[in-house]
Amino acid sequence: MTDIASIVSEIAEDMRAHEHRGKVADYIPALAAVPDSKFGIAVVLHDGTVHTAGHAEEPFSIQSISKVFALTLALGAVGDQLWQRVGREPSGSAFNSIVQLETEHGIPRNPFINAGAIVVCDVLLGRLQPREAIGQMLRFVRMVAGDESIAIDEAVASAEQDTGFRNMALANYMRAFGNVHAPVELVLGTYFHFCALAMSCRQLAMAGRYLMDGGRSDGHSVISPRRARRINALMMSCGHYDNSGDFAYRTGLPGKSGVGGGILAVAPGIASIAVWSPGLNPSGNSHLGQIALERLVQRTGWSVFEPRLSGA
Ligand code: DON
């Protein structure tokens, strides 16, 4: 039998010693200040067992991982109508790129690039005030993680606002195409607060249980099994921006990264996994986080492309 506890602690030990750690995001002081020596991993198994190692209890800025939760809320609000305003194709471009928006008439390629997540926020603001949307997001992540202590780091949210010129350009550009309806500053205020959610690896892996378990978390239905499958498919194809193909090749898992250095990955029916190491690769994904997930899959066979003769 595979001993997950030993695998998890061995991976953390290997990552501690790793020399090349990637480059920590430095566009805001709160991210620049995080030491690149940090590494955490949490694995929540289908039976509820949790294995952690390294700095797994330390909250970090989840940044773009919040785009998964925002998508879940927007699909809950408007269902498949969302796809009239956002695509479902990998962009092959940087997470904050504007180039495709011109030829594609302000319709972002997918909900996991910045432009797509901004439209997702605008969709939520079709029914809610920003304060209500932010409250709904907080309640949602606390509920799926089973942890009322999860909070938004207001210093990060306001620093994002002060430096978010590209996001302002994206939102204004899409507004010119009629694909952002609410005032741009309200849409971005909501988006920046989502990015500023602070969660530990344990909290994030717990929050990902509904994607691991066909839409169920702790025995409760959060979304339908079909929706969970589809969100996982989008994470597999688009969760790591222009690095998504390589991540899928290396791990065979749906995953979503953030520039805080976190990655949420899902082995459907088996485990929800969160890793954190703040040093990034050139696409803005955690360098060691990806290596750690690749090792985990090599040792457990958890890739979704692994034949499962039992049919489990
Ligand atoms: O909106 C932005 O550009 C930042 N808050 C970072 C988003 C992000 O995490 C992209 N990911 N890798």
Image (spheres, helix red, strand yellow):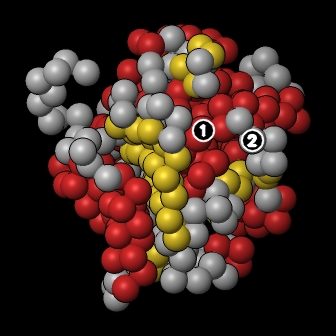
Q: Is residue 151 left or right of residue 310?
A: right
Say which of 60 and 259 sits in front.
60
Q: Disc 1 residue type?
A: Ala
**Residue 265 x, y percent position in the rendering:** 41, 45
Outermost residue to the front:
1
Tag 1 near tag 2, CB within 8 Å: no
- For label 2, the SS is loop
Q: Evaluate whether residue 114 shows in this view.
A: no
Q: Disc 2 residue type?
A: Asp
Q: Residue at x 71, y 36 (%)?
A: 146
Quadrant, the N terminus: top left
Label of residue 147 in the image: 2
Label of residue 194 in the image: none
Sooner in the amino-acid sequence: mark 1 or mark 2: 2
Q: Residue at x 51, y 11 (%)?
A: 224
Q: Residues within 10 Å of mark 1 (few under 14, many from 20)?
A: many
The correct choice, above or below, for 39 with respect to 289 in the image is below
Q: CA distance from mark 1 to mark 2?
A: 9 Å
Q: Evaluate whether residue 43 shows in this view.
A: yes
The correct choice, above or below, for 35 with respect to 89 in the image is below
Q: Residues within 10 Å of mark 2 (few under 14, many from 20)?
A: some
- For label 1, the SS is helix
Label of residue 207 in the image: 1
The correct choice, above or below, for 244 with respect to 284 in the image is above
**Residue 182 x, y percent position in the rendering:** 76, 30
Quadrant, the C terminus: top left
Q: Residue at x 64, y 57 (%)?
A: 200
